[in-house]
Image: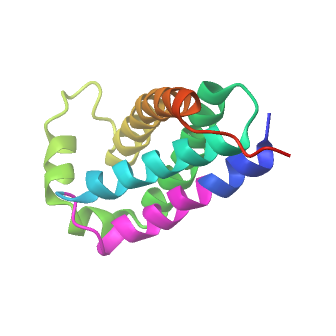
Amino acid sequence: MNWKLIFQLSVFGLIMAFATISLIPEKIEFVFWLVILVFCSYVIAKVCTGSYFLHGFLVSLVNCVWITTVQLIFYTSYIAHHPDMAKSYESIPAPLNVHPHWCMAISDVIIGIISGLVLGLFAFIASKIVKKKTA
């Protein structure tokens, strides 16, 4: 497992965490994430010698930690710039809607797992396409 690479690629998640607070509108955020996922899958395929899916999945899990932490710390600013997200938290049924911070944390983890599956798949596919550097 290339933990250094996983951490380095997860810095994109940290940058996006801060960028989504107030800079990047939620309607185009997915475009940035798509570019990041494609780039990360390419780098994983180019650098790693195996476990491509697992590397991609772990990058997204570390991203999830960064994003959840930053969004919870800057919750007020995040919600102010993401009104659709605030409305979706309000529409959660009463037993599950304990506190908006908890709703955000739970949804971020679910999104992190799903994006991990996507990045893992992208990395696996990229490993079949990308040619390795020869020593």
Nearer to us in this view, 73 or 50: 50
Which residue in the rendered view is the most extreme toward the bottom?
Answer: 23
Question: Relative to 70, is 91 on the left or the right?
Answer: left
Question: Relative to 75, is 133 on the left or the right?
Answer: right
Q: Residue at x 54, y 45 (%)?
A: 42
Total numbered circles:
0
Q: Position of residue 100 (x, y in %)?
A: 32, 46
Q: Position of residue 124 (x, y in %)?
A: 55, 26
Above or below, comparing residue 50 to residue 7 in the picture: above
Whether residue 18 appears in magenta in the rendering, the answer is: yes
Above or below, comparing residue 97 to residue 80 in the picture: above
Nearer to us in this view, 103 or 52: 52
Q: Residue at x 44, y 53 (%)?
A: 36
Question: Relative to 19, is 25 on the left or the right?
Answer: left
Question: Relative to 37, is 135 on the left or the right?
Answer: right
Q: Residue at x 21, y 50 (%)?
A: 85
The magenta segment is 10-26
Q: Position of residue 54 (x, y in %)?
A: 64, 27
Whether residue 34 appears in magenta in the rendering, the answer is: no
Query: Where does the N terminus fall, quadrant-wise?
Result: top right
Above or below, comparing residue 80 to residue 99 in the picture: below
Q: Position of residue 67 (x, y in %)?
A: 48, 54
Q: Magenta: predominant secondary structure element?
A: helix
Question: In the rendered image, which quarter is residue 89 located in?
Answer: top left
Q: Residue at x 55, y 26 (%)?
A: 128
Nearer to us in this view, 106 or 24: 24
Question: In the rendered image, which quarter is residue 71 located in?
Answer: bottom left
